[in-house]
Image (cartoon, coloured by chain):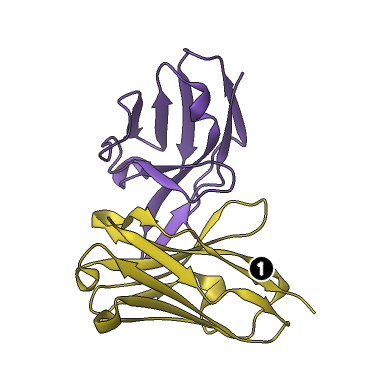
Amino acid sequence: SYELTQPPSASVSPGQTASITCSGAKLGDKFACWYQQKPGQSPVLVIYQDSKRPSGIPERFSGSNSGNTATLTISGTQAMDEADYYCQAWDRSTVVFGGGTKLTVL
Amino acid sequence: EVQLVESGGGLVQPGGSLRLSCEASGFTFSSYEMNWVRQAPGKGLEWVSYISSSASVIYYADSMKGRFTISRDNAKNSLYLQMNSLRADDTAVYYCARATTYYVFDYWGQGTLVTVSS
C-alpha cells in the first residue's frame, strides 16, 4: 500500500521560513495537498493540487511537489501557525495521509 | 456557509455497532463526493471511506472493508457510516469531509467521538 512519510516534528523562529516535507514513491506524479490542524479543532485545507491556496489562506503558505517529495513552506511564520500539518495524496482508489508534523514556533 | 455536522458517536462495547450521520448544509450536497476520516486520540488522520456524488462509486480503507458501510441520502443532505464489529482500535473522532477534484477535502465537520470499550 502507498505510504507518505513526514518528519514527526519541526521548529521555526517567528518570522523565519518553515519547510515541512512529505515523501512518497513518485509523489510528484500525483497531486499533494496539505492540512493544518490546531489542538481541539478540525483540519483545515491550506494547500491543494501541490501549490494552490484556498480562499482565505494567507499568502505565506506555499507548496511544491517534485520527484518523491512534496514540501509545504510557510514564509514569515507566525505564532498562530503552530499546529500539526498533514500531507495527503490519492493512489489507486485510496486516500493516503502522512503521519503528520508538529510545527513548533519558538 | 458550508456546514457539516456529525452525530451518532458514543460509547459502544467491542463487537457492537454504531451508525454515524453527517448533515450537510450551505451547498448542493448531491453534487459533491464525500468521505469519512478518523483520528484516534493523540494520533494522525486516517482515511476511512469515500462515496461519489451519486453513490455509484464507493471505496474503503483496507482495515474497514467488510465492517463499515458508507451511504448517503441526497434528498436528506446526509452522509452515513454504519460501523459493525467494532474494536478498541476503532476508537477515534470521526470526521465527515467534502471532497473536490482530486480528492481534496475542502470542508470538514467538527467530528463525533466513538469510544469502543467494555
Return the residue nearer the eye: B100 or B62. B100
Total residue callouts: 1
Q: Is residue A15 visible?
A: yes
Task: Determine whether, in the image, residue A46 is placed left or right of residue A9.
Answer: left
Task: Determine whether, in the image, residue B33 is placed left or right of residue A69.
Answer: left
Return the residue nearer the eye: B44 or B66. B44
Q: Residue at 62% of width from left, 32% of height from top?
A: A9
- Please tell me whether residue A99 is drawn above or below residue A74 in the rendered image: below
Q: Residue at 45% of width from left, 55% of height from top?
A: A96
- Please tell me whether residue B61 is drawn above or below residue A4 in the rendered image: below
Q: Residue at 47% of width from left, 39% of height from top?
A: A23
Chain B display color: yellow
Secondary structure type for disc 1: loop
Q: Chain of mark 1?
A: B
- Please tell me whether residue A3 is drawn above or below residue B25 in the rendered image: above
What amino acid is found at the position of numbered circle 1 in the picture?
Thr
Q: Residue at 34% of width from left, 77% of height from top?
A: B78
Q: Is residue A26 visible?
A: no
Chain A display color: purple
Where's residue B20, x and y in %?
Answer: 50, 77
Residue, disc 1 = B91
Where's residue A33, x and y in %?
Answer: 36, 44
Q: Quarter holding the C terminus of chain A?
A: top right
Return the residue nearer the eye: B2 or A57. B2
